[in-house]
Amino acid sequence: MQHVVIIGGGFGGLAAARALAKAPVRITLLDRRNHHLFQPLLYQVATAALNPSDIAYPIRSVVAEQDNVRVLLAEAKSIDPTARTVTLDDGLLEYDFLIVATGATHSYFGNNWSAVAPGLKTVEDALEIRRRIFLAYEAAEREADPVAQREWLTFGVVGAGPTGVELAGALGEIGLQTLVHDFRTIDSTDVKVLLFEGTDRVLQAYPPKLGEAAKRSLEKRHVEVRLNTRVVGIDPHGVTIKDATGEHRIGMRTVLWAAGVQASPLAASLGVPRDKAGRVIVEPDLSIPGHPEVFVIGDLALMTSKGAQVPGVAQGALQGGKHVAKQIAAEVRGTPARKPFAYWDKGNMATIGRASAVAATKRVALSGFLAWLMWWAVHIFFLVGFKNRFVVMFSWVSSWLSYKRGARLITGDVGALPRLESIAPDGQPSMPAGAETVAFSESDGSAASPG
Amino acid sequence: MQHVVIIGGGFGGLAAARALAKAPVRITLLDRRNHHLFQPLLYQVATAALNPSDIAYPIRSVVAEQDNVRVLLAEAKSIDPTARTVTLDDGLLEYDFLIVATGATHSYFGNNWSAVAPGLKTVEDALEIRRRIFLAYEAAEREADPVAQREWLTFGVVGAGPTGVELAGALGEIGLQTLVHDFRTIDSTDVKVLLFEGTDRVLQAYPPKLGEAAKRSLEKRHVEVRLNTRVVGIDPHGVTIKDATGEHRIGMRTVLWAAGVQASPLAASLGVPRDKAGRVIVEPDLSIPGHPEVFVIGDLALMTSKGAQVPGVAQGALQGGKHVAKQIAAEVRGTPARKPFAYWDKGNMATIGRASAVAATKRVALSGFLAWLMWWAVHIFFLVGFKNRFVVMFSWVSSWLSYKRGARLITGDVGALPRLESIAPDGQPSMPAGAETVAFSESDGSAASPG
């Protein structure tokens, strides 16, 4: 029986594996994680609305009933298309067909900002971001210097695509709603979120009027949108931006990265042309030039459909996975007839916060509460697994009714919080004697510094 | 207004803070974590039945509506009862009354086994244990050497108190039920759990007939109970035990520690007598000798009530917290009349697994399904927060119906899995040539080694 190796258990890889359930092949599905991640909701884990396991599901469970799949927890190091082998950490896998679906990671455009401005791709990323957000409020509560306190309550988000917009909206709501009764020294509604975007509008991929609606909705959540603004420096105490008026420095202690993505480095070993972001430029049938038995799908591929580029979203990966599964199934059954991939754009949606979202299909552009309900229904529907759907629905309904975020735990290292010399009789933190204005800046400890 | 400082946001500290809600005092509640942990259910996080946030709740939220409490995320380093100050990492807190409730941590009885046999006290501990359990199955699936494979499917638990019994039962059920369809090379029902206990029965604190019932129930779950057995050595590849027949070595890759506990080291700075486990020997009213304004409660104290030692359980801490709050409230209101602490033993319960538990009160001793229902109802009832109760109930009902464990994610470092030289045409892992029996032992990489 022919051996199909699939690298990556994301939307593309899993869709391909499932679509091959009845094909006379044996499948090995590799992933370096044991779980499939429903990435469109990952920002909800980062902002404590959901738990990791609400949106992540063991890959083994997803394919447990499919007898022709073997799941391996392993990382693919390189691919040799000539020898038809995949090199793992510690061994080789031979294949007859290969589907590469390892996705993308953050790109800091050559800057070394990963420690000061984490991005959002994995469960670990989301937990790290959650830790920084809630520690910032703890730090502000302990901070005696008003300038430093202001910086702890200021959050920066770089990039106003869907992830940046979702993170910024949630960051505002955490201060305005979730934490509103929790602190004694600070007022959490003093939260300020700065959303930096290099182009002239938010949500570039959406119709301009939805971008406008999103911007207004963000502003209600204490998000200040800075368009035509490039971030040129980030450190634990602030960012440096460049806009039409020159370079400026803004003090803040928490910065999140939602700007660039870059294809997984595995693509390089295929030895075929790639674009600037490292994506493999695939043939119309999603195979690679010269190797019809090797397919690349999802965010790792620059896929085109009817002359247009397929966006790097879950739908693109899912449909790509199904498409290549069909081509392989046809070939092993002796009826090879490669077809070009045709992407069906079901539309895009992004949420800004409680009861606010934008949704666009070819025919309609919606914003506000109705778009939010639609967003909600679609995301619940596509979550893998019966249980998750209901637990997530319950968490959402409950959070919505109570304004609380249930998963607000800080785990891992707490890091260094601002110095607290003593608690004065009025219960307020007092400044260390003779250090009124330099209390924090003399310390390089910061909750935002890497653990 | 007098200042009450409470160190520790566990059962004792929180109960004291809440019981002081109407007293004319201001309260500072210190904890080095931002969350209260419902520790009786922590083993369910370790065994992937629940999420951390199902059983952990931000301390700020618990007391958000109580205006006289200020919560500080900070670690107390030492206490000076003469100066009436608590030293933090970076400052001092002055108090009029002090309640010390920092609990206990694991004790390895002087051995350096924390890396090879993690214990279960914090959310991080639970996630580390979860990681090891599920990685062990992944490793077994990849392992070609049958001896090493057997070792990956063998789990050791040291100590047959409630935590040890609960972990061992859950470990058996994970292999027998949860993972039963997930693997292709191994059969997860080959799981074997060894529960080591130094005394002559499991659950010493319970009536002997319940210990017997628990043992039988464990055996149905592939748990082999080794009584009168001391563990004298643990390393990443196995344990050395000593029983009536001498010393023996048993190969296994995952060992969990549920044997000893030791009071938090903060107690030492009080300068008062402590027992062998480091617990403070408190006065009948739970204050310390010579300092009626300092109280020690919960697992940090050796509390006695009517001549009998109060067990180190949640009820003891809760009741202790309420008791000292009453003494303080009376004193600040000018009606000091210290009363000795009287513990009301509501009984003990431990669960062994699906539909099996033991419960003992002064009058009744129950085992089996009825005890399990009781265990379930009591634990749901005492969970902090409306939402948690329902989410946990839903998770349990859903897990019970489906035999699945929803929170089965491996996060953090995957570590080194067994070497996998190649996948043979039959889809089975093959051994590296010429290394049939030493494939694993030559590698010191192990999922059980510290991250």
Image (tube, coloured by chain):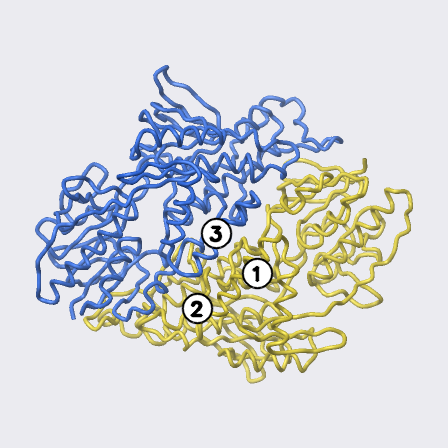
Chain colours: A yellow, B blue
Relative to A238, is B97 on the left or the right? left
Above or below A305: residue B364: above
The earlier-in-sequence mark between 2 and 1 is: 1
Above or below B305: residue B215: above
* Residue B28: percent from left, percent from top: 25, 64
Label 3 environment density (alpha carbons within 10 Å; few <14, some 14–19, many ≥20): many
Q: Which residue position is annotated with label 3?
A: B51
Quadrant (top left/top right/bottom left/bottom right) for the C terminus of chain A: bottom left
Check disc 2 and give the amino acid type: Arg
Check disc 1 and give the amino acid type: Leu
**Do tags 1 and 3 sit on the same chain?**
no
Relative to A168, is A72 on the left or the right? right
CA gap, disc 2 to disc 1? 22 Å
Quadrant (top left/top right/bottom left/bottom right) for the N terminus of chain A: top right
CB of mark 1 within 8 Å of CB of mark 3? no
Above or below A147: residue A386: above
Q: Which mark is residue A42?
A: 1
